[in-house]
Amino acid sequence: MKKELIERKVYQCPYCDDESLVYDTEEHAEEHVKECIFNPENESYATSKFLGVELYPPYPRYAKNDRPYQVQKLLNGVFHRAYDTRTGEYIKDEEFYKPAPEWEEAELTFDGDKRYYKRPEVRFSEEMKESKYYEQFKEMADELKEEYPELRDEGKAA
Ligand SMILES: [Zn+2]
């Protein structure tokens, strides 16, 4: 005999908008929202217009295996590194959990009634340039520039 389904009510953060990140109680969800790096009220680097992403090849030696899930989401995994586009300095993973210096919100873009932040500036690390992944990523970056013309001026990517 087939078992009956269990119905459960869960809460989701409106900023993460991630169905794999749910909370059993409203209180837990609200606690998360207060610290969520994607909540612009927290003025983190995740919502800052000065966030840049430096691409690294996916080799274990570059993996940041203790990277928090939200930062993994933001930086597309454990290999790439964040930097401040004003200084070029790296942003450590834990710095996403405090306000970014002189925070200004990243520009928004819209898809129907969904709001997204525009893609951050991208640059290639020397390690990436020397890896076999470089050509593939370079092509992807060029395609993105066609798709998002605002990236063109920041084409220091290559
Ligand atoms: Zn969240």
Image (cartoon, helix red, strand yellow):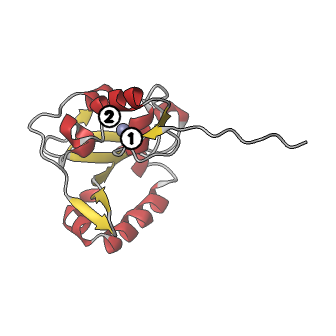
In the picture of the structure, the residue carrying the numbered disc 2 is: 33
Instruction: Give the structural element (helix, strand or loop) at label 2.
Output: helix
Q: Position of residue 113 (x, y in %)?
A: 32, 65
In the picture of the structure, the residue carrying the numbered disc 1 is: 13
- Residue at figure coordinates x 16%, y 48% from the top left: 105
Labels 1 and 2 touching (C-beta < 8 A): yes
**Dividing the image into 4 quarters, which one contains the C terminus?**
bottom left
Q: Does label 1 or label 2 sit earlier along the sequence? A: 1
Tell me the CA gap for discs 1 and 2. 6 Å
51 on left or right of 68: left
Q: Which mark is residue 69?
A: none
Could you tell me the amino acid type at mark 2? Val
Q: Nearer the viewer, residue 55 or 25?
A: 25
- Residue at figure coordinates x 28%, y 28% from the top left: 97
**Disc 1 residue lies near ligand 1 with CB under 8 A:** yes
Q: Position of residue 154 (x, y in %)?
A: 21, 61
Q: Is residue 43 visible?
A: no
Q: Nearer the viewer, residue 143 or 103?
A: 103
Could you tell me the amino acid type at mark 1? Cys
Q: Nearer the viewer, residue 96 or 53?
A: 96
Q: Quadrant of ligand 1?
A: top left
